[in-house]
Amino acid sequence: MIENVRGFMGAVFEDYRERLRKQLKSMNYQVAWRLLSASDYGVPQLRPRVVIVGLQNWAADGFKWPEPNPFDAPTVGETLHELMASNGWRGAEAWAQAADDIAPTLVGGSKKHGGPDLGPTRARAAWATLGVNGKSIAPEQPERDFVGMPRLTVPMAALIQGFPREWQFAGKKTSAYRQVGNAFPPPVAKAVAEQISTALEANHLLYPIRRSA
């Protein structure tokens, strides 16, 4: 399973996609790809990404793409209210009610974008509509008398990306945020991986996997 940006599906990459398909076919793999939106799998952001799945011929017929969740993803306010309020911020409830939509695609954190922020001007403007200051990542949650638009912390960004609360990130703020901002949302990876597992398990009795000694 490989993840790529949505541009992979563009006409300019048609020859590249065909070469990839032929190369994997020569290795006895069948390959398929699909554009998936993270919000369809419970992640509170858009994040459209192409997922590429390659399965050996004996298992490929059993693979089906995961169905989107039948319910809407939580909003930014619903996702982050508890953390925003954890230092006693008196404006947390009003902020959460106003942040009543899913997030734009979480970007930033890469060396290209200069460090721990929520991306270029356009991305920051989209976050501002949800009451979030995207110019930098905060070291901690808003204090009791904080006034203005709060910034996200690394744990908040991780929740927006779909990581479980207990997940730990190594390093200082910039390093940790790069791990979050460039990640593939775990709930989407899990949904696809479960379908891969089903395809493998459904066929392993007919075509057992030979393991080297």
Image (spheres, grey):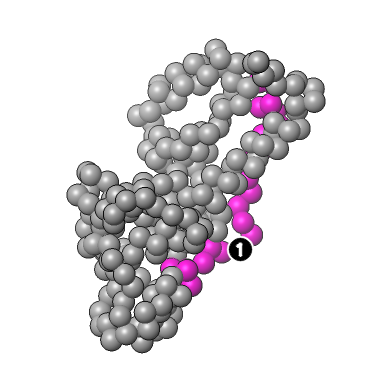
Residue 114 on image: x %, y %: 19, 49
Residue 46 occupies quadrant = bottom left
Dominant SS type (magenta):
loop
Vertical placement of 187 versus 146: above or below? above
Depth check: 202 or 66 in front? 202
| Residue 85 in sight | yes
Residue 136 on image: x %, y %: 24, 62
Residue 104 on image: x %, y %: 38, 59
Q: Is residue 138 left or right of residue 203?
A: left
Instruction: Report the residue marked by disc 1.
Output: 71
Depth check: 205 or 7 in front? 205
Residue 179 on image: x %, y %: 36, 48
Q: Residue furthest top?
A: 26
| Residue at left offset 29%, top offset 54% | 172
Q: Residue furthest right?
A: 205
Quadrant for the C terminus in the image: top right
Q: Is residue 40 left or right of residue 140?
A: right
Vertical placement of 166 versus 100: above or below? above
In the rendered structure, which segment of residues is drawn in magenta?
Answer: 57-79
Query: Is label 1 in a helix, a strand or a loop?
Result: loop
| Residue at left offset 60%, top offset 40% | 193
Depth check: 172 or 112 in front? 172
- The kind of residue on which mark 1 rests is Phe
